[in-house]
Image: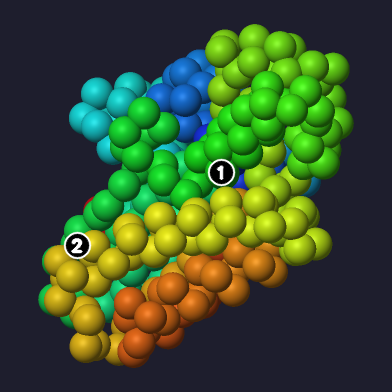
Amino acid sequence: MRYVLGFDGGGTKTECVLMDSARQIRATTRSGPSNPLRVGFDAASSAIAQAAQFATREANIEPSQINAVCAGLAGVGSHNAHEEMERLLTGMFPKAAVRLITDLELSLEATGQRPAIVLVAGTGSAAMGRDADGHTARAGGHGPLLSDQGSAYDVGRQAVAAAVRSRDRTGLETPMGTKILQHLKFSSWTELRDRARTAADEVFPRVFPVVAAAADAGDNSAQSLLHNAAHEIAILADSLVERLHLRDTAFFLGKTGGLIGVSRFFDTELDAQLKQLAPLANVGPLPVAPAEAAACVALELNATRSSS
């Protein structure tokens, strides 16, 4: 029996699937963030190593029995970042065949369809698509300074800014502001601000569940934030629909990431806007979890390696 590992890593978490050569999932584990551009290469590689350790322990096998690894990670789109992360992965799994791709490429692989567009809405936001001939295009995914519109980071930052502005204006906390501080376990906005200056990814994305719960409970300000977030994310898909000439074509439009399935209000808003821009699209969640898709890619990698 041969074993492979598949990883799906982003700015909040890393998911890992250990699969055997019979395509049976033997372990599913999770660890911290592994986007090297957000948390650094050392922290990213540590998260991957920890998820792998959990998986081999759960499957009751030795790490040396891993024959192939596929990791789909956010933040490895540039040549330098890809090269460094690939070097770290190869050192981590010296006996295994290793393939490193971006989280967008992995999510598109998970659709199993052509044409298709996939939206990744999590700590960051991005989209990638492929037409019937295999031509690909992407939008977003350039980090919080240049993009990530509609992401958990973006929604959280806007919610915090609105709560702080309201307090400055009235001297009173808004209900959502109070819930944000309680949820993040900060005693004051000064404490939150100081933490955000040094570790913004540990602050703003974690605000999203508070906004999601408030929106589902009927809070107008929260609903406005999520309406705008859905619009921004839909724009990413719209740009790819245009570039790949899919406006009048039936295709699969997949959704994945930490924002999906958290808020009924947000999911309804996003689906409505996606159906408006692509009426013939089949909008829905990915048929296979990205980490599982990565494990399947690793199996193919192992088969190619064995036959050569």
Q: Residue at x 57, y 23 (%)?
A: 200
**Spot occupied by residue 131 in the image (x, y as percentages of width and height):** 20, 74
- What is the x, y in percent for residue 16? 60, 47
Question: Which one is in front in this view, the residue at disc 1 or the one at disc 2?
Answer: 1
Instruction: Say which residue label 1 marks.
Output: 155
Rendered image: mark on residue 136: 2
Question: Would residue 142 be found to the left or right of residue 125 on screen?
Answer: left
Looking at the rendered image, the quarter that the C terminus falls into is bottom left
Quarter-wise, where is residue 231 in the image?
Answer: bottom left
Near-viewer residue (276 or 34): 276
Helix, strand or loop status at disc 2 = strand
The relative height of residue 265 versus residue 87 in the rendered view (above or below) is below
> Does 272 sit left or right of 1 as displayed?
left
> Does residue 262 show up?
no
Measured in 3D between alpha carbons, the distance from the residue under mark 1 to the one under mark 2, in whole angstroms, is 28 Å
Can you name the residue that lies furthest to the front here?
170
Residue 274, x across and y down, in percent = 41, 74
The amino acid type found where label 1 is placed reads Val
Q: Residues within 10 Å of mark 2 (few under 14, many from 20)?
A: some
Vertical relation: 121 (above or below) 240: above
Q: Amino acid at mark 2?
A: Thr
Marks 1/2 in contact by CB < 8 Å: the verdict is no
> Taking 231 as reference, is 37 above or below it?
above
User: Which label was assigned to residue 170?
Assistant: none
In front of the other: 285 or 216: 216
